[in-house]
Image (cartoon, rainbow, N blue to C red):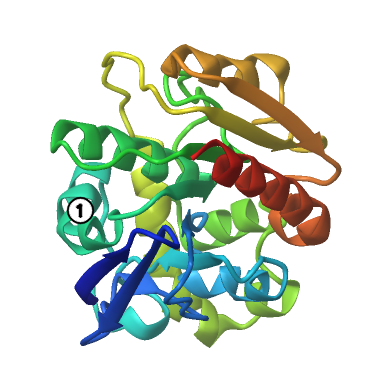
């Protein structure tokens, strides 16, 4: 976690010392003199490590911080949380120390919903709001998913659902022992997504930049993407990338080009 924070007024940079690592926050390439943080939330079943390749595509004035939820990677021994409120209540005290400087929130799929709720929890607790919110691969939170829930399906049917989504390698889906390890986390994350209930609040004052995949039929429709605009009184922008729901991987370079351009705009505005 972060400790010993100081601020250099001349360079507009935050200098910090680091103490015990925070298990909730994965920082693959610490940038003590960064002027901006990019805080990322992974999709259902994903670990913070999915964002590791981004460190080679981000400028050195950006520090990448990825949220590591319980039940995966370095937190494999911990039970996965199964509802949004529990995640927010546990996460907020852990992440609030790093909200001391301008930051951008990015979330893909379930991660977009969690990042959205984090903004609202931060507002409730009078914590700094992000300079920009970038939800990707996710319909607006108030749009109800009419699909039947899947998180309690028998293993064979649940695995088939994963196969259709095209986000899990075939070699993993066919590895019985490995699937038995990852299924509890996947089910927990699907439970979070499928049981999420949007609660109306006043609009946020954060700019939104919504990203979607052209072949992501459930999330990229004009209605699904543009409906995010109902949740902000600030600037709103959207963009489509080629690819299905997991364009975050298949179109990584194209996605990071858009992200970097947005980060430059944020820095110029701050």
Q: Is mark 1 on a helix, strand or loop?
A: helix
Can see residue 164? no
Relative depth, front residue between 188 and 11:
11
Q: Where is residue 251 in the image (x, y as percent from the top left)?
A: 81, 55
Label 1, residues with CA under 10 Å away: few <14, some 14-19, many ≥20: some
> Which residue, given by chain and number where applicable, does mark 1 sit on?
92
Q: Which residue is drawn at 48% across and 67% down?
A: 34
Position of 79 with respect to 110 (left or right) is left
The one nearer the camera, 245 or 54, is 54
Q: Which residue is drawn at 65% across and 31% down?
A: 219
Q: Is residue 204 visible?
A: yes
Q: Which of 52 and 71 is in front in this view?
A: 52
Q: Residue at x 23, y 40 (%)?
A: 122
Q: In this view, does 259 lie above or below 28?
A: above
Vertical relation: 94 (above or below) 174: above
Q: Where is residue 43 in the image (x, y as percent from the top left)?
A: 52, 55
């Amino acid at each position: 976690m972060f400790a010993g924070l100081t601020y250099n007024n001349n360079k507009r940079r935050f200098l910090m010392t680091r103490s015990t690592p925070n298990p909730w926050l994965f920082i693959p390439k610490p940038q003590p003199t960064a002027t901006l943080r990019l805080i990322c939330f992974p999709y259902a079943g994903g670990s913070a490590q999915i964002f590791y390749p981004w460190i080679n595509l981000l400028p050195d004035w950006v520090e990448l911080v990825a949220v590591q939820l319980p039940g995966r990677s370095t937190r494999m021994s911990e039970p996965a949380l199964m509802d949004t409120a529990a995640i927010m209540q546990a996460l907020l005290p852990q992440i609030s120390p790093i909200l001391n400087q301008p930051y951008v929130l990015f979330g893909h799929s379930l991660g977009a919903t969690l990042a959205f709720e984090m903004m609202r929890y931060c507002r409730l607790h009078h914590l700094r709001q992000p300079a920009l919110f970038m939800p990707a691969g996710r319909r607006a939170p108030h749009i109800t998913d009419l699909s039947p829930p899947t998180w309690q399906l028998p293993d064979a049917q649940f695995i088939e659902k994963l196969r259709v989504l095209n986000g899990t390698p075939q070699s993993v889906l066919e590895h019985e022992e490995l699937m038995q390890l990852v299924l509890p986390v996947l089910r927990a994350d699907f439970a979070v997504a499928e049981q999420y209930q949007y609660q109306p609040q006043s609009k946020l004052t954060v700019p939104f930049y919504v990203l979607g995949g052209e072949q992501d039929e459930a999330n990229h429709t004009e209605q699904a993407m543009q409906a995010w605009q109902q949740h902000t009184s600030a600037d709103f922008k959207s963009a489509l990338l080629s690819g299905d729901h997991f364009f975050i991987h298949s179109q990584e370079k194209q996605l990071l080009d858009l992200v970097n351009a947005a980060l430059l705009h944020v820095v110029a505005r701050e």
